[in-house]
Image (cartoon, rainbow, N blue to C red):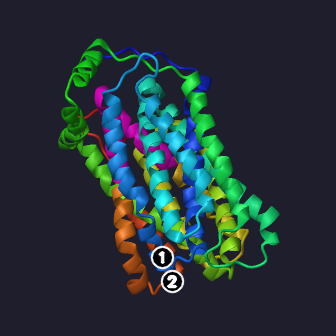
Amino acid sequence: MGMISKPRLSFWQIFNMNVGFLGIQYSFGLQQTAINPIFLFLGAPEDMLPILNIAGPVTGLIVQPIIGAMSDKTWSPRWGRRKPFFLIGAVLGSLCLFAFPLSPTLWFAVGLLWILDVGNNMAMEPYRAFVGDKLPEKQLSLGYQMQSLFVGAGILLATLSIFLFQYLFGAEEVSETVGTIPTWIYYSFFIGAILSVTTILWSVIKTPEIPPSDEELLEINKHKGLSFLERFKMPFVEISKAVKDMPKFMWKLSIVYLFQWYALFVYWQFIVPLLRTTMGYDTSEAAAQSAKMSFTYNVVTMLVALALVPLTLRYGGKKIYASSLLGTGLALLIIPYISDPYLILVPMVLFGIGWAAMMGIPYTMVSKIVPQDRRGVYMGILNMMIVIPMGIETLTFGPIFKNLLGSNAINAILFGGIFFVIAAFFAMRLNVSKEEGPQIE
């Protein structure tokens, strides 16, 4: 496969390329901080929260690798390779964000979450591959850590809006009524709907895609000549081939991800119930406090995301990644024992460092060892490694929470902390063989 020489990009070109991640991650920020409170407002019992969140894992498992494989075989001189997919995903997500806080019932909200996750996943995977397509290898670390910065910025804005609007308008709603979503939460979703489209458009307009090589174009045109049925089957064939040929490093990373993403889903689902238990808050107050904690760790993520670049170059991605996971685990083991609303923000510094590492370092590692012409499908498979643990969590943690952890949110968060420590142990075993690519000690 012929390789195209990629020009070195300026800092601001890499910045503009990643602006679209702000809108995508604002939406994910709402999912982390506001979706579960909305389910609670609409009457969901706490032990049902995991299964109600199954939309994310299922749609991620199906949508991202298929879109990744499809985008690998796509090229339009006008629209590019990856752009059509994340633009359509952004529009779909935007419409769902407008509708979500207007949900009249729990199951209506759950249905919207499925559609929202389809849109977000459709935008997410091609965006990961988009950065890898554009940047030479020496700039991949900066490119993916810039994405990590926008991950922090998007979620930061989402969480800031939640506790700000709750502070400004939440007092007007004297009591919570089961089946009713407070109006103060509407505004965060409306802002997200606007950002979802405008930030993606910014990157689409500002960043041209690199045309495929002659060999790639020949393969794409060959794909276009296939029948509809053959083209429909092609993404599944590509995924199965890619899994069969997958580097051993990615299999090792999947073990880390199993514990890491299981633990993260536990945290996002049970931090509001934890705060209702440890601080005696109602759901609105707990959601606002959770948003402050999320805001804190995402500020840290923004501050340290680019600082991790020289650290990974000096000490190796594996060591920085593992130590960051260990720090996140320690944060979760401390949080349940803090009842002060300000002191509880301190361990979120460790969480923020870990989040910055999780959102950047693994993607840099993988992007260096997978072939250029299959980067889209491998980024989709990497996302499968995220959503499979999440799917396992949604199916298993409800019974674990109810039967083994005494339906106690404190035990749930401690459980997540232990899983992060296990993830850190396996992260220290991430090595790349000489056959796979450059060493990333």
Residue sitting at x 21%, y 38%: 233
- Between 259 and 328, the one lying in front of the other is 259
Circle 1 — which element?
helix
Identity, as a three-letter code, of the amino acid under mark 2 = Asn
On screen, residue 408 versus residue 81, left or right, reads right
x%, y% of residue 387? 37, 55
Query: Which element type, helix, strand or loop, lies under badge 2?
Result: loop
* Crowding at mark 2 (Cα within 10 Å: few <14, some 14-19, many 20+): some
Relative to 71, is 263 above or below? below
Q: Quick check: 424 left or right of 431?
A: right
**Vertical placement of residue 379 versus 283, above or below:** above
Question: Looking at the rendered structure, which numbered label has been put on residue 64?
Answer: none
Q: What stretch is highlighted in magenta?
A: 357-385
Where residue 357 appears, as percent x and y from the top left, is 50, 48
Query: Is the C-beta separation of discs 1 and 2 under 8 Å?
Result: yes
Tell me the residue that label 2 is attached to: 408
Q: Which residue is drawn at 51% across and 19% down?
A: 208
Q: Mark 1 points at which residue?
A: 412
- Residue positioned 39% across, 57% down in the render: 57
The residue at the point 65 percent across, 68 percent down is 181
Question: Cα distance, mark 1 to mark 2?
Answer: 7 Å
Side (left or right) of 58 relative to 24: left
Given the image, on which type of amino acid does mark 1 rest? Ala
Using the image as rendered, state which of residue 382 and residue 394 is in the foreground: 394
